[in-house]
Amino acid sequence: MNEAEFREHLRARDCSRVGIVEWPPGRVSAEHAHEFTALGLILAGGFTLRTAAGERVLRPGDHFELAAGIPHVEDVGPEGVTILSGRIEPPPA
């Protein structure tokens, strides 16, 4: 999926906070979970996404969807990473 197709995918999924996220080389997050579903397309660089289900190495052109509430770790590679991202927010309580 290219950037234009992914932007259309984000629009079709009614994503909020669509934008570019950049993480520096070597950044490793503490395990955490989000209150929203995260979607992303890797534009440059890469990172490893680790969950209880395993790990996935994401490189340019790869995309991911991480459901709300899933504990995970992001381990950025030596080039850093640039991600086109969006969120699917939970419905209001």
Image (cartoon, rainbow, N blue to C red):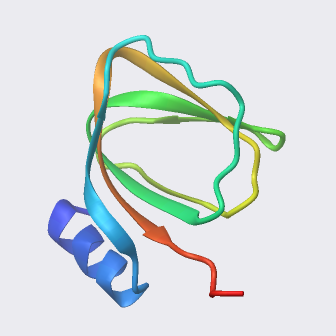
Quadrant in which the C terminus appears: bottom right
36 lies above or below 15:
above
47 lies above or below 37:
above
x, y percentage for residue 28? Answer: 54, 18
Residue 78 lies in quadrant = top left
x, y percentage for residue 57? Answer: 53, 32
Residue drawn at x 63%, y 87% as measured from the top left: 91
Residue located farthest toward the right when viewing the structure as drawn: 52
Residue drawn at x 33%, y 66% as measured from the top left: 17
Residue 32 lies in quadrant = top right
Residue located farthest toward the left when viewing the structure as drawn: 4
Q: Nearer the viewer, residue 33 or 65?
A: 33
Determine whether, in the image, residue 75 is placed left or right of residue 90.
left
Residue drawn at x 46%, y 61% as measured from the top left: 39
Residue drawn at x 64%, y 54% as measured from the top left: 34
x, y percentage for residue 14? Answer: 40, 86
Q: Nearer the viewer, residue 38 or 8?
A: 38
x, y percentage for residue 43? Answer: 23, 44
Quadrant in which the N terminus appears: bottom left
Residue 51 lies in quadrant = top right
**How many numbered discs, if any?**
0
Determine whether, in the image, residue 26 is placed left or right of residue 57.
left
43 lies above or below 77:
below
